[in-house]
Image: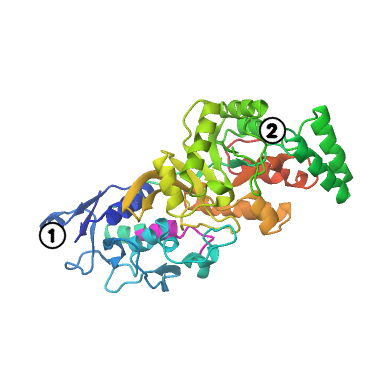
């Protein structure tokens, strides 16, 4: 146990200290506001206050954790040895306020401030302080914690910490369960005309064979996905998109009996989550409707959620998720940029700054996806595999959680996806313990 003297207890202090100690350092922390109790304690301890009490291990506090609401704070980066830090302080055993800086990132404080949005009304990654200082591609919070642990152990040689375990789970977005099968006749005709107009004759004939003769749809790869799951014994979650057709949501109708049967079948062998539709971003009525649709299909509560296009608005989207009793969100990432949006690879609770309270909703960081590598970065499969393994190894080094996002069509035999099959298979092989 580590004792911390603090001059004032606030919800922000309680939230960030307990996350950093209990979840990252795996160490119990106790607070005291009594100087006498702090002085009398003979174990590992430090003070977190504007000024030190005496010669104790001391971290000078930044005002952020003792405020309410959102205020502008100038962010200047410095260095702790070779590690970038911000919220620098003076007369402290470490050169910055680790707790305020971590809270700033995990609470997504910067997303409450005025900022630019992209064409999908999302927080633009270019706004991020981590992006601006070339730190987006590393879990900076875990890096800070490791150095902080070393500093404490130098002061308290008998202090020990348990190691966290690396966790790997691929996420499967089912935004288009079928390419041709199960779509309306109008969509079939329009797609066929488009194939002919662009002289895509192979696709035209494949579309007709699948739609008219019952040939297996090229996006129906779920049997292969489950076989790989069984072979490599890894956790897996399917996120299903259940909404009507729109400009950005192109899945087949959720009313199709065969599709509902497949969702129920997959739920028997892997976890099931909801992929909220594009226009559900902060519409509680739409989100609630989509949750109930999925629950009626799988006959159990929905606890996991991802936003299609990573389209979230903070805090409104997460406030709705929390109100709807969803427990785990997997949207904490950028759609067009590799990196750690909240500066961490370890799940953390959503802190609602508007209400100054820690919620029950856990946010699971995602930092990379197959379509991002293919379409935004325009990489070939070999280069993409190298990048995804590198990102996973970074997370493994810091004992975080690696949630690469894939789509069911990555195992398709279509020309544009066949070369990408190995990206999925090799990633699974690399991060599981099953020997071939």
State left or right for residue 268 relative to residue 345: right
| Residue 76 is at least partly visible in this image | yes
Residue at 28% x, 70% y is 92
Q: Nearer the viewer, mark 2 or mark 1?
A: 2
Position of 101 relative to 356 (above/below): below
Position of 283 relative to 296 (above/below): below
Residue at 29% x, 74% y is 90
Tell me the crowding category of disc 2: few under 14, some 14 to 19, or many 20 or more residues within 10 angstroms, Cα based: few
Q: Which mark is residue 35?
A: 1
**Residue 31 in magenta?**
no
| Residue 403 is at least partly visible in this image | no
Which one is earlier in the sequence, the residue at label 2 or at label 1?
Answer: 1
State left or right for residue 358 relative to residue 408: left
Displayed quadrant of residue 102: bottom left
**Residue 139 in magenta?**
yes
Position of 139 relative to 60 (above/below): above
Residue at 71% x, 40% y is 411
Position of 77 relative to 365 (above/below): below
At which x and y percent is residue 176?
Answer: 67, 40
Magenta span: 133-148
Q: Nearer the viewer, residue 226 or 352?
A: 352
At which x and y percent is residue 36?
Answer: 10, 58
Q: Which residue is mark 2?
A: 224
């Amino acid at each position: 146990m580590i004792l911390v003297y603090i001059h004032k207890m606030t919800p922000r202090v309680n939230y960030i200290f307990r996350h950093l100690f209990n979840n990252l350092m795996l160490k119990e922390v106790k607070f005291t506001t009594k100087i006498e109790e702090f002085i009398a304690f003979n174990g590992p301890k430090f003070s977190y206050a504007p000024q030190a009490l005496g010669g104790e291990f001391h971290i000078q506090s930044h005002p952020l954790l003792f405020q309410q609401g959102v205020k502008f704070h100038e962010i200047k980066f410095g260095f702790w040895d070779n590690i970038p830090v911000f919220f620098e302080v003076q007369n402290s055993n470490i050169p910055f306020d680790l707790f305020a800086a971590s809270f700033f990132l995990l609470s997504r404080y910067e997303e409450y401030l005025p900022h630019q949005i992209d064409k999908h009304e999302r927080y633009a990654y270019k706004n991020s302080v981590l992006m601006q200082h070339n730190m987006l591609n590393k879990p900076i919070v875990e890096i800070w914690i490791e150095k902080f642990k070393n500093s404490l152990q130098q002061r308290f040689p008998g202090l020990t910490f348990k190691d966290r375990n690396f966790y790997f789970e691929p996420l499967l977005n089912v935004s288009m369960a079928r390419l041709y099968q199960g779509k309306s006749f109008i969509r079939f005709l329009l797609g066929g005309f488009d194939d002919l107009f662009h002289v895509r004759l192979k696709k035209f004939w494949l579309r007709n064979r699948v739609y008219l003769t019952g040939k297996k749809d090229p996006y129906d790869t779920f049997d292969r996905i489950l076989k790989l799951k069984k072979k490599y014994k890894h956790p897996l979650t399917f996120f299903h998109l259940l909404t009507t057709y729109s400009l950005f949501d192109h899945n087949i109708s959720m009313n199709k009996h065969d599709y509902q049967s497949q969702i129920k079948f997959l739920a028997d062998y892997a976890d099931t989550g909801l992929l909220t539709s594009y226009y559900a971003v902060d519409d509680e009525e739409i989100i609630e409707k989509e949750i109930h649709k999925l629950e009626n299909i799988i006959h159990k509560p929905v606890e996991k959620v991802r936003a299609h296009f990573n389209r979230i608005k903070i805090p409104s989207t997460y406030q709705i998720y929390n109100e709807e009793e969803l427990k785990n969100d997997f949207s904490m990432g950028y759609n067009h940029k590799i990196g750690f949006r909240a500066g961490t690879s370890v799940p953390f609770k959503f802190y609602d700054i508007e209400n100054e309270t820690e919620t029950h909703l856990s946010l699971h960081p995602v930092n990379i996806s197959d379509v991002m590598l293919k379409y935004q970065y325009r990489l070939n499969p070999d280069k993409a595999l190298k990048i995804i393994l590198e990102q996973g190894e970074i997370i493994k080094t810091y004992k975080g959680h690696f949630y690469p996002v894939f789509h069911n069509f990555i195992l398709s035999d279509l020309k544009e996806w066949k070369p990408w099959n190995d990206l999925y298979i090799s990633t699974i092989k690399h991060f599981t313990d099953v020997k071939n």
